[in-house]
Amino acid sequence: MPDKRDLRSQLIAADRSLAHQRLPPVAVQRIANAISRELDHHPRSRWIPMATFVAGAALVLVFLSYVGGVGLSAQDEGPTSLALQTVVSGADCHRDPGEALRLRGACEVVMYDPGIRIQTIARADFSIEAQRMRVHQGSVLFDFDKVVGEPIRVHVPGGEIVVVGTRFRVMVDGAGGQVDLYEGRLEFRADDGTRTPIGAGQTFEFGRAHATVTGQPKGPDPRPPPPISVPAAEPDPRSPAAPSGARPKQTSPRPHQPTAQPATQLEQPSTERDAGALIEEVQQLERQGEYARAATVLERALDLAWPDRTGDVLSNELGRILARRLGDRDRACEHWARHLRRFPSTRYRRQIDPSIVTLGCAEAEVSVDLRQTER
Amino acid sequence: MRSGSQVLPSVTAQGDEIDCRARVQWLYRHHRDEVYRLALRYGRGDPTFAEDVTQDVFVTLCRTIDGLEDWNDLGRWFYRVTHNRCLSRMRKSAARSARATRWLLGRPAEVDDGSRALHCTGLRQVFGVVDTLPPKQRIAFCMYYIDGLEQAEVGEILGCSKSYVCKLIKRARATLAAAGWEMTDA
């Protein structure tokens, strides 16, 4: 039974418990679309821009000819400079002169297309030029609306962080630093080409010599946890050796071993729903053009225990990406051979056989069964 | 809900005036979570209710943005509109779930989906107490006791007189007292 004394203090406490709640990312996008539709269809939104355009036509033409056609409108076609769409504020914010936007101190930067909000903490050193951002020093908090099209890149010592819509903090200290991801997904691309996905609630350290440890979830995340998480382990032997000073510290699991991170959806996958979520994630990556990453996600997933039927589906997806999307003949042939050994009664024989022929996989690479069916 | 710390820029770093769409987007980014949280309070933690209210508020913003005067004090505007949208939805919900309406439309009683309510049983019980009040009483009560507004301010937001607000709060207290709850004054 609840304590019936002093309802007011209980109500206030209950209300404060909602203080951490944020509008879920899916709702953020849905409502943003509704706002956009409302602005497009509202009668006023038609004639005001038209009237402004007529009145300022000559001035706009002069402006466009001066800056080369770059503007603030979300309807502009072609690449636009991030630096030209920013609003900078902050009492202790110092802006260096020059074409690139270079900020030092405590600043707040707001961009409109795409919607980005950036806060730099005191003594931070941060710059924006063309389509790139760079954290030189200090701590910077990023809050992105969903980025459509070319991902935005944040350069840091040792690599770059690729952003497609998320909320995270980057801290750079000398030659290294870390990124704390609160929402969404990121990928760290080291200078040596290694790519490491980062899930919500994780911390990734970059640019330092000593090994890093994956972070624990930092706080409530409105989105479900990522299906594959990256535990602390030795460097992935499949990735190329990194030159000294640029070694990525985030590590990937040993090949053919399950991940060590507890309590994820797919640690003991056995349900169609888990596979469905995984397929959805892979399809999303494919839509974004992230084929290598999609393949990596599937490769790691296939290390886990799946029912044969589900494993057959996932393995076929991987082979399709390797063969058609990445065009990696060697890996695709090797994968199809593994697939046919693991799933001799595969449902995708009619697709796999032509793929093997098209790729020109050597007879020794594929199952004996294939040679028998070709007769 | 305060927006004083967030100054809506009127021009870009290059001196170009920001258009209506950009202003709305800026306001959406800076106020959406506050609106959402406020709506969660009256929706008993139901995210669907809160999301719908949030959308209503910002669609209203799109329609009335030309008439807004003080761009740098829109916190009060959002507070007022969010409360009015919550009140409107709560009234519709109460009307839909009234016995006579259900009988007329042939609908069964709505089942309280526990998965949509606040995760903590204690919080659910506390908000559940206030949930028994009629919508306008509930809102006036929360604005007065949780947000600490004066009765005149509550009346201004709800569009009624101070004396009527006083009456609403008294009735709410009487209802809660009858259920055994005690209230300390704000």
Image (spheres, rainbow, N blue to C red):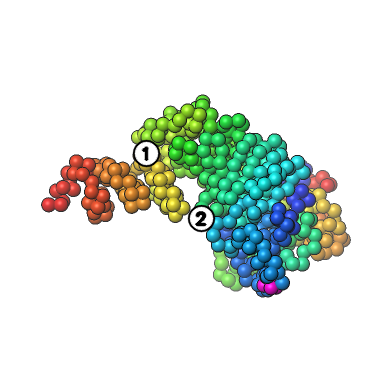
Q: Main SS type for the magenta part?
A: helix
Which region is colored magenta? A50-54
Q: How far apart are the alpha carbons under marks 2 and 1?
A: 32 Å
Q: In the rendered image, which quarter contains the N terminus of chain A?
A: top right
Mark 2 secondary-structure assignment? loop
Kind of residue at disc 2 = Gly
Q: Is residue A91 magenta?
A: no
Q: Tell me which chain the residue with mark 2 is part of.
A: A
Residue pointed to by mark 2: A149
Query: Residue B103 location, x and y as percent?
Result: 59, 69
Nearer the viewer's eye, disc 2 or disc 1? 2
Image point (57%, 59%), residue name: A30
Q: Is residue A220 visible?
A: no
Mark 1 crowd level (few <14, some 14–19, many ≥20, 10 Å Cα):
some
Residue pointed to by mark 1: A304
Quick one: label 2 or label 1, which is nearer the N terminus? Answer: 2
Mark 2 and mark 1 on one chain: yes
